[in-house]
Every structure is written in structure tokens, then in C-alpha cells.
Image (tube, rainbow, N blue to C red):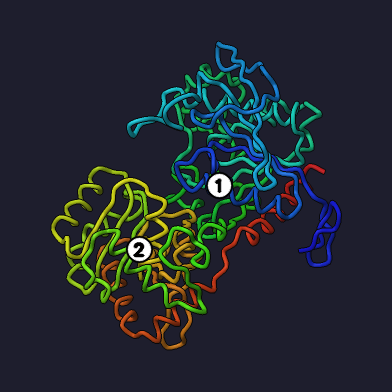
């Protein structure tokens, strides 16, 4: 792809640069609870680097700080009340502009979505106001060629654009793309939400927001967006099934011709063993000697005895929830540790899995260490120092850690679901092909069998080094994903040309 003035040449074809407005509930570096925030950093930045004009709209959460005022007061109806949020703007970051919706009554809170494991009771009102403010920014502040929304928190944007602003000439030619990051979270509430949010009654309909008598924000976004994307090819297939569609599989199937799976990218400016400032020593596929130094450093950091240098060191960095397959690990933990392995884990989440890891570390302190919470530096050390990275997820829309681990020559062992299935190729020692290990059945027995197979390969040092080099050669950069999104944007714009 080459930049020619305000257009691009892709495969001999000229593509005009676009103004792309992203709307999301979180984005690095301002607010983060999960992978959504990483996407909202990496993708806009990659598009801006390609020459597109890109802006991101976020709520002004507590801690983001004071920003330059663009509009001192918008008038936004939410149910029986009028709200008057201000619109702020920060300095651009890596070519991306950031706008913030400043509604202190909704967003000046200790957490993004809720506290103590729960959700704020007025989340429907909060994100209705936010969606309406996104539309006003697109009309009054920064007129885009396309709006790209993410998950249920902004799914009302296409619903409102087509169901309320439908005759506004400012929006008739502006398409909306909606990305599904996790179908399990839909923004489903009781019928009273129509009144509480002030959404017009004609939207409470099976072809709009109505869902078995409730209101479903994500359903509306799926139906009213011009194009849909999911965060991996496999996940785009899975959300069309009852198992992964969470009741909306029929809706997704009805839009299948407008659905594209695009794998998220990895940020190699941050996750790269050649220049990672958090690890003990740098290394590369051409010279992997210092990976052993990183393993020793990780063992010291986790206070594990040095004899574990000779064992296969398994690393985990994750939320401790059932989705991530920790029930499978719990079923066979004793069998895993009967093998010649050691284990380090970093994460937090469900109290029962936190207690499980604490118990495991207490019982096998010679081989197991756990740190509860999130520690960015330690996450980098685990990616660099472990031999095997364990991700036995029951479902995983995309996953990023397996991409990071491959870049560090830390071999992923994953269940074949979503983006894990798309990104990891099973290793075949006979041919030397492959980048990791996969199992298909969501059972403890399938997991332990695959761990034993990985351990068998680990002791064949020549084969394992080949596997490491294969993994480190894989490229999951955001530039690859951004080019695919441009193709989707073009199709969406053609629908409204």
C-alpha cells in the first residue's frame, strides 16, 4: 500500500482517504477493562498511519483529567430529564484525535461499568446519552465519512441514526460499522428502559430493539448497522450458532451477508522481545540465547527455586473466570503438576479461581507461584520467560495473549475456539510446521493430553527451537487488520453512495 496525496494505491487501485469516527466505551491510554481498549488504540493508530483522518469518542471518566472544551453544553434528552454534557478534546496521540463526553452525573465514578463485581443500575441511561452525544459530535464538531461503533455500549448509534435521525440530510450518506467483541454482553434490560432512556416507542419492535419482551441494545445495532464485523474469522462463524450467539444467533444469521470476521492486531511496538523495556534481556528469532535469562529472571521475580530452570515453565496471564477455561485447569491441576513442569499465573477475577490458585501455590510452592491482580511489568516478564503459554478458553472471540506469546517464542497451548483457532497452527514435529498446540474438546482430559504432548516436544530441543522460530515469525500486526477494515468501510460506503 502506498500513499499518494489524499488517496491510496492498493493492488493498482486508488482509494480515497477517509474521515473515520470511532465510538467506544473504553480505549487505551484513557480507560481499560479488557481487550476492547487495546483495539481502540491499535486500529485507529494504524489507520492514521495509513493517512486516514481518525477520531475516537469516549466518555470522560474520572481520572482522565481536564481537556480542552469544544462545546460547553449539548442538550441531550434521556428519559424524562434533559442533560447538558460538554464535549472536550485532548491533544492528538499518534495522529488520532480524541473527543470526550463530559457528563459528570454519569461518568465521574470510581469504575467504568460498575463496582464490586456488579453493574451500575443506570448503565442504559449512561450509554444512551453517550450514543446521542456521538451523533451530535458527528453533526456539529467532526463530520465523518463513516462511524465505527463497538459492542452494545454504542449499538444505539446506528439505531438512532436510522430510526430517529433518518431524514436528517447530515446522516443519510454516513454508514455505520458495528464490531462485536463479545456477544455475551448485549445490554439487555426490561421494557421500562424505553421510558427511562426516552427511546421512541416505534423502536420497541421485533425488527428493532424488542427481544422476548425486553430491550436489547446490541440486537438493535446488529439490525441497523450497514456492516458488521467480529474480532476473528472463527468468531464470526461461532456467533451464528446457539452456543455462542446467546440468543441473537438468528439475528446474526439474518445479516450474514454483511458480516466479516477480522482478526485483531497485536501491538508490536509494546510487545516485542527485541525492544521490551520490562524484560531482563532482549532477544530475537535470530538470537534466542537471552530467553533463558528472561526465564531465570521470571523465576526470581516469582520466588521459585532455580531448579525450575530445567522444567517446562507454563505461564498464565488472564482474568480468572470460567470463560477462560480455569475450571478445566482445576480438574487436572494435580495431573499437570505430576509432570515435570512449573507454573506461574497472573490475574484476578472469580473468587473461587483466585482461591484455587492460592491453594495450588501453597501446596506446591516449589513449582507454583501466583500473583493476584494486574501487573503490566510482570505480564511482560511472563510472556518473555515462560516456555508455554496456557489459554484453555471455553470461548475466546479473538485473544491477544497468544499473539504476544508467539512473538516472544513462548509457545501457546489453546483450545480451538474463536481467534485462538484462527491464530495457532498445531505443531507437527515430522514436518517442522506449526506454531503451538491445540485441543478441541472442553474437557480436562483433552487439556492434560495436550500438555503432555507439548512436554514431549519440549524435550526434543531441536524440534522446540524450530517451533519457537515458527511462532516468532508470525505477523499479527495492526497494519494487516487495518487494510481489511478499509475494505469493509468501502463496502459500507458503497451502500450509501
Q: Residues within 10 Å of mark 1 (few under 14, many from 20)?
A: many
Residue 362: quarter of image: bottom left
**152 or 317, which lies in front?**
317
Rendering coords of residue 489 (x, y %)? 72, 49
| Contact? badges 2 and 1 (CB < 8 Å) | no
Q: Which residue is mark 1?
A: 252
In percent of the image, x 75 and y 33: which residue is there?
Answer: 142
Q: Residues within 10 Å of mark 2 (few under 14, many from 20)?
A: many
**Residue 456 vs residue 244: left or right?**
left
Q: Visible in this render: residue 394?
A: no
Indicate the quadrant containing the C terminus: top left, top right, bottom left or bottom right.
top right
**Residue 87 vs residue 430: left or right?**
right
391 w.r.t. 226: above or below: below
In percent of the image, x 46 and y 85: which residue is there?
Answer: 432
SS at circle 1: helix
Residue 147: quarter of image: top right
**In this rendering, the label closer to the viewer, 2 or 1:** 2
**Residue 138 vs residue 256: left or right?**
right
Q: Residue furthest left?
A: 363
Amino acid at each position: 500500500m502506498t500513499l499518494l496525496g489524499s488517496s491510496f494505491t492498493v493492488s493498482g487501485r486508488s482509494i480515497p482517504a477517509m474521515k473515520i469516527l470511532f465510538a467506544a466505551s473504553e480505549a487505551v491510554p484513557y480507560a481499560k477493562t479488557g481487550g476492547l481498549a487495546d483495539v481502540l488504540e491499535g486500529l485507529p493508530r494504524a489507520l492514521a498511519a495509513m493517512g486516514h483522518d481518525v477520531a475516537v469518542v469516549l466518555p470522560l471518566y474520572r481520572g482522565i483529567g481536564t481537556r480542552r472544551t469544544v462545546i460547553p453544553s449539548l442538550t441531550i434528552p434521556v428519559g424524562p430529564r434533559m442533560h447538558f454534557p460538554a464535549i472536550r478534546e485532548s491533544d492528538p496521540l499518534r495522529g488520532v484525535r480524541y473527543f470526550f463526553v463530559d457528563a459528570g452525573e454519569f461518568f465521574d465514578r470510581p469504575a467504568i461499568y460498575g463496582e464490586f463485581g456488579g453493574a451500575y443500575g443506570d448503565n442504559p441511561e449512561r450509554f444512551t446519552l453517550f450514543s446521542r452525544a456521538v451523533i451530535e459530535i458527528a453533526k456539529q464538531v467532526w463530520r465523518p465519512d463513516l462511524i465505527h461503533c463497538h459492542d452494545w455500549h454504542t449499538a444505539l448509534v446506528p439505531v438512532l441514526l436510522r430510526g430517529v435521525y433518518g431524514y436528517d440530510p447530515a446522516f443519510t450518506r454516513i454508514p455505520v460499522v458495528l464490531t462485536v467483541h463479545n456477544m455475551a454482553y448485549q445490554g439487555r434490560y426490561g421494557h421500562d428502559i424505553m421510558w427511562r432512556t426516552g427511546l421512541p416507542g416505534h423502536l420497541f419492535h421485533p425488527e428493532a430493539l424488542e427481544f422476548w419482551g425486553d430491550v436489547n441494545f446490541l440486537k438493535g445495532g446488529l439490525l441497523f448497522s450497514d456492516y458488521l464485523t467480529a474480532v476473528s474469522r472463527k468468531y464470526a462463524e461461532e456467533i451464528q450458532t446457539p452456543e455462542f450467539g446467546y440468543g441473537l444467533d438468528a439475528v446474526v444469521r439474518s445479516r450474514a451477508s454483511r458480516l466479516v470476521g477480522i482478526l485483531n492486531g497485536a501491538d508490536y511496538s509494546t510487545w516485542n522481545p527485541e525492544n521490551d523495556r520490562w524484560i531482563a534481556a532482549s532477544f530475537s528469532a535470530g538470537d534466542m540465547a537471552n530467553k533463558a535469562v528472561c526465564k531465570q529472571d521470571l523465576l526470581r521475580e516469582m520466588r521459585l527455586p532455580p531448579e525450575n530452570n530445567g522444567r517446562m515453565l507454563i505461564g498464565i496471564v488472564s482474568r480468572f473466570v470460567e470463560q477462560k477455561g480455569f475450571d478445566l485447569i482445576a480438574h487436572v491441576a494435580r495431573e499437570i503438576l505430576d509432570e515435570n513442569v512449573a507454573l506461574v499465573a497472573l490475574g484476578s477475577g472469580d473468587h473461587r479461581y483466585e482461591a484455587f490458585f492460592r491453594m495450588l501455590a501453597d501446596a506446591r510452592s516449589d513449582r507454583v507461584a501466583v500473583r493476584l491482580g494486574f501487573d503490566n511489568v510482570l505480564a511482560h516478564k511472563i510472556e518473555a520467560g515462560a516456555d508455554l503459554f496456557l489459554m484453555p478458553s471455553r470461548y475466546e472471540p479473538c485473544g491477544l495473549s497468544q499473539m504476544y506469546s508467539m512473538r516472544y517464542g513462548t509457545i501457546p497451548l489453546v483450545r480451538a475456539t474463536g481467534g485462538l483457532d484462527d491464530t495457532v497452527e498445531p505443531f507437527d514435529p515430522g514436518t517442522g510446521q506449526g506454531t503451538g498446540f491445540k485441543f478441541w474438546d472442553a474437557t480436562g482430559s483433552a487439556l492434560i493430553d495436550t500438555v503432555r504432548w507439548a512436554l514431549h516436544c519440549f524435550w526434543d530441543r531441536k524440534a522446540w527451537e524450530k517451533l519457537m522460530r515458527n511462532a516468532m515469525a508470525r505477523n499479527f500486526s495492526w497494519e494487516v487488520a487495518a487494510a481489511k477494515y478499509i475494505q469493509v468501510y468501502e463496502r459500507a460506503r458503497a451502500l450509501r453512495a
